[in-house]
Amino acid sequence: MNLPDSSAIAIIGNLNVDQIVSTVTRFPKWDEELLVDRSELVLAGTAGYIAIAASALGVDPFVVSTIGDDTSGEFLRQELARLGIPDRGIVTIPGEVTCVGIIFVGPGGERGILSVLGAHTRMSVDTARQFDAEVARCREVMLCGNYLLPAFAPHHVRDYARECRARGQVVAFDPSWDPAGWPEQTRNDTLALLEHVDVYLPNEEEICHLTGTATWQEAAAIVAPLVPELVIKRGANGAVCISGNAVTEVPALPIVAVNTIGAGDVFDASYLLARRSDRSIQECLEFACAAAACVVSQTGERTYPDVAMIESFQEQHRSS
């Protein structure tokens, strides 16, 4: 698959540090100590993983987020520089700590997360507007991690999303998991925002919590009429896109998941960039599923694939 349009993508949301702990077979009781295999510090957050995946696919990401003036913030800037990702849109908030997610990875790649918000409490639409000239040059505007950004929550970004669409940009939206437990106001605000979104990319569990339904089909019946393109990530069950009256469903590749952290974010970047080509929705979904599978099935140090690697992985596992 060629990605003929190499214009940048704006990624506005939660850039943070992840402290990944694996493999966790059970959690310790209070005052108990257990041993695990490894721990690593990585550039992360929905914005971080989307940026890394987009960069690997040959598209420049422009990231807008907030960090603290601490060693974690310095680490993030160093990692961005190492990866060749510009940090011009990253705002350091004096006196704040950088957002850190502590992620526990189980033996089957499942995960549990504890987060410290820190500087993310100061991320707002005003932060994004500081970089409007650079954001306006991007083909897509990806709004992400909004449930972890109190001043960049769905009701805050509604007008901003509308303005981006009005100037011809594709507005994509992946607010991630809601640590507040999906209160009614957040659910209503999220559904109202979709009027100004082109592509909404929740996972299956998230959209069921958003709508209070038991299945993705029931959830899609509520959400699909609100947004031109609803893409539901279903993990080991593949993915589905509902666009108008068309429903396109694809299976996942048969792989063994080792570490699912960032899988949905890699999917998001791959799907959005595949949309730039002349491929069908089915082919875009298959490409994005293959990209995510390629990443989560890796053992050892993680690498992010380019287009050729994804297509090779896709072909290999189709025939296996």
Image (cartoon, rainbow, N blue to C red):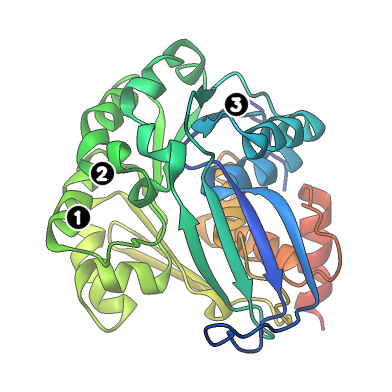
Q: Quadrant of residue 107?
A: bottom right
Question: Horizontally, is 177 left or right of 71 in the view?
Answer: left
Question: Horizontally, is 21 left or right of 38 in the view?
Answer: left
- Label 1 or label 2, whichever comes before in sequence order: 2
Q: Gap in Å between the C-alphas at discs 1 and 3?
A: 30 Å
Number of numbered discs: 3
Residue drawn at x 80%, y 77% as measured from the top left: 37
Task: Choose between 137 and 3: the one closer to the eye.
Answer: 137
Residue 198, position as x, y percentages in the image:
34, 42
The disc at residue 186 is 1
- The crowd level at tag 1 (other Cα within 10 Å; few <14, some 14-19, many 20+) is some
Q: Gap in Å between the C-alphas at discs 1 and 2?
A: 7 Å
Foreground disc of the pair 3, 2:
2
Q: Is residue 53 above or below residue 311?
A: above
Q: Quadrant of the C terminus?
A: bottom right
Can you see residue 268? no
Residue drawn at x 21%, y 28% as measured from the top left: 159
Q: Gap in Å between the C-alphas at discs 3 and 2?
A: 24 Å
Q: Secondary structure at mark 3?
A: loop
- The crowd level at tag 3 (other Cα within 10 Å; few <14, some 14-19, many 20+) is many
Q: Secondary structure at mark 2?
A: helix
Can you see residue 235? yes
Question: Horizontally, is 257 left or right of 305 in the view?
Answer: left
> Which residue position holds label 2?
154
Q: What kind of residue is marked 1?
A: Thr
Residue drawn at x 84%, y 72% as measured from the top left: 316
Q: Quadrant of residue 296?
A: bottom right
Question: Horizontally, is 239 left or right of 222 in the view?
Answer: right
Residue drawn at x 20%, y 41% as measured from the top left: 155
- The crowd level at tag 2 (other Cα within 10 Å; few <14, some 14-19, many 20+) is many
- Label 3 or label 2, whichever comes before in sequence order: 3
Q: Are marks 1 and 2 in contact (CB under 8 Å)?
A: yes
